Image (tube, rainbow, N blue to C red):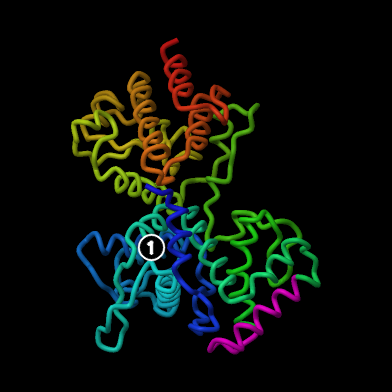
C-alpha cells in the first residue's frame, strides 16, 4: 500500500485544476482553514457513518454534528441563534466547494433547488477528518497543484526565494489580477482575503514568509497562524527544571475547545482500529473505551495525542488499566502492557499499512513526557524502543 501522501499526490496528478479552464474562484475561500476543513470533514464522515449517503449544504448546516463543532470548537452561537445561519452556511458551503474541487466529494444531482453531494474518495475524507495536520497537508498539496496548473506558481517561488515587500506585492497583485480575469470574483478586497488562505499553507510547508493582516509576515509562517481557532493547552510545554505540580497549576482551566479536541482524537482512534481492542488484538475483541495511557489530569498536553490513546474493551479499561474501576488510579504494570501494545499499533501503521496515522517521534515524545526523562531519542528503531520501555518499567 502506498503512503497516503503519495496517493494524494498521484490523485492530483490525474486532475487539471487550471482556474483558467474551470473558472472556479471558490476552489478555496476565507473560512477554509485546516481546523475548519478537518472539522467539517469529520461532520460529513459522521453523517455518512450513520447512513446518509448524500447530502446538501443545508443538511450539514442543520446537523447536530456541525452545531456541536461550531459551539464547542469555534465558540459560535448555536444554529437556532438569530444571525447564526449565515455563518453556518459559509462554513459548510466553503468547505464543500473545496472538497468537491479537490475530488474528495462529488456533485450527484439536486434535491429541490439545492445541489446534492456524496463522497467520491472515502480514504481521503477519513485522512482529512482525522486531524488538523492531515487537513493542512492535503490543503497544501491541493493549493500548490491549483497554482501550478493555473500558471501562477512561478510567482510564489519567486517570493519564497526572496520574501521582500516588493516581491510580496508583486505576487499578491498577480494573484488578484489572475482571479479577477479568470473567475466570477471581481473584488480586489475579496481576492486579497482569499489570497492569504492560499499563500500561508504553502509558505508554512516551505518554512517561508507569508502574509499576516494583509501585509507580508515579518517572520516565517508558524503553525498557529493557519488556524481559525487554536486551543492553548497544546502549545504549552513543561520546562525541564519545573516540577509537574507547578506546571499543572499554571495550565489554563479546561474549556469546551479542549474537550472537543480530546473527544475528536478518541473518535479518530476508535475509527482507525475499527472498534477492536489494541491489546490481545488477535482475539478481535470488541472495544469502545479509549484510555489515556498517561492520565489526562496529569498530562493535559498529551490529552489529544493519538500515541497516548489506546482502544480497550470496557473490561480491560476498568478492571486492568484502572484497578477496581477507580479512574483516579493507574496500574503501572498495565501501563507497560498498554505502551507495548500501542507501539505495536504504531509499528503496523508506519511499516505495514503506510498510512501515517501514527508517528514514532510523537510516541517518543509521549514516553519522555510521561516518564519525565530522556529515555528515548529520535532515530531509535522500534525494537530498541521496545527494549528501553520494558527495562524502564521492569527495573
Secondary structure under tag 1 reads helix
Could you classify mark 1 by the number of other residues whose Cα lies within 10 Å: few (under 14), some (14-19), or many (20 or more)? many
Q: Which residues are magenta?
A: 168-188
Residue 341 or 14: which is nearer the viewer? Answer: 14
Q: Is residue 244 above or below residue 262?
A: above
Q: Is residue 304 above or below residue 151?
A: above
Residue 41 horizontal side relative to residue 232, left or right:
left
Q: Residue furthest front?
A: 14
Measured from the top left, where is residue 327 in percent x and y?
32, 31
Residue 219 or 205: which is nearer the viewer? Answer: 205
Residue 56 or 148: which is nearer the viewer? Answer: 148
Looking at the rendered image, the quarter that the C terminus falls into is top left
Residue at 47 percent across and 34 percent down: it is 363
Residue at 42 percent across and 17 percent down: it is 390
For disc 1, the marked residue is 41
Which quadrant holds residue 42? Answer: bottom left
Residue at 27 percent across and 84 percent down: it is 110
- Tell whether position 327 is magenta: no
Amino acid at each position: 500500500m502506498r503512503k497516503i501522501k503519495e496517493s494524494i499526490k498521484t490523485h492530483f496528478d490525474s486532475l487539471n485544476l487550471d482556474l483558467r479552464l474551470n473558472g472556479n474562484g471558490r476552489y478555496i475561500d476565507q473560512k477554509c482553514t485546516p481546523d475548519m476543513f478537518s472539522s467539517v470533514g469529520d461532520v460529513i464522515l459522521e453523517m455518512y457513518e450513520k447512513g446518509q449517503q448524500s447530502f446538501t449544504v443545508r443538511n450539514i448546516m442543520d446537523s447536530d454534528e456541525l452545531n456541536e463543532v461550531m459551539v464547542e470548537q469555534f465558540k459560535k452561537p448555536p444554529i437556532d441563534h438569530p444571525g447564526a445561519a449565515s455563518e453556518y452556511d459559509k462554513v459548510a458551503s466553503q468547505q464543500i466547494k473545496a472538497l468537491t474541487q479537490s475530488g474528495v466529494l462529488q456533485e450527484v444531482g439536486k434535491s429541490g433547488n439545492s445541489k446534492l453531494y456524496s463522497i467520491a474518495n472515502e480514504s481521503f475524507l477519513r485522512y482529512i477528518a482525522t486531524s488538523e495536520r492531515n487537513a493542512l497537508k492535503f490543503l497544501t498539496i491541493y493549493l500548490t497543484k491549483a497554482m501550478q496548473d493555473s500558471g501562477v506558481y512561478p510567482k510564489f517561488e519567486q517570493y519564497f526565494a526572496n520574501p521582500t515587500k516588493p516581491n510580496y506585492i508583486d505576487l499578491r497583485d498577480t494573484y488578484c489580477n489572475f482571479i479577477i480575469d479568470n473567475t466570477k470574483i471581481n473584488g480586489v478586497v475579496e481576492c486579497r482575503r482569499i489570497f492569504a488562505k492560499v499563500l500561508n499553507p504553502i509558505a508554512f510547508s516551505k518554512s517561508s514568509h507569508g502574509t499576516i493582516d494583509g501585509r507580508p509576515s515579518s517572520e516565517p509562517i508558524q503553525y498557529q497562524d493557519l488556524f481559525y481557532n487554536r486551543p492553548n493547552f497544546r502549545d504549552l510545554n513543561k520546562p525541564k527544571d519545573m516540577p509537574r505540580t507547578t506546571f499543572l497549576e499554571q495550565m489554563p482551566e479546561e474549556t469546551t475547545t479542549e474537550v472537543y479536541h480530546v473527544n475528536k482524537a478518541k473518535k479518530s482512534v476508535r475509527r482507525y482500529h475499527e472498534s477492536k481492542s489494541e491489546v490481545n488484538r488477535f482475539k478481535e475483541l470488541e472495544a469502545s473505551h479509549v484510555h489515556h495511557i498517561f492520565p489526562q489530569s496529569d498530562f493535559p498536553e498529551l490529552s489529544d495525542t493519538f500515541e497516548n490513546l489506546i482502544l480497550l474493551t470496557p473490561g480491560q479499561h476498568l478492571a486492568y488499566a484502572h484497578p477496581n474501576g477507580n479512574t483516579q488510579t493507574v496500574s503501572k504494570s498495565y501501563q507497560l502492557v498498554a505502551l507495548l501494545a500501542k507501539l505495536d499499533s504504531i509499528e503496523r501503521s508506519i511499516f505495514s499499512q503506510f498510512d501515517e496515522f501514527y508517528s514514532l517521534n510523537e510516541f517518543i515524545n509521549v514516553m519522555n513526557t510521561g516518564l519525565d526523562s530522556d529515555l528515548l531519542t529520535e532515530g531509535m528503531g522500534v525494537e530498541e524502543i521496545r527494549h528501553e520501555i520494558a527495562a524502564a518499567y521492569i527495573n
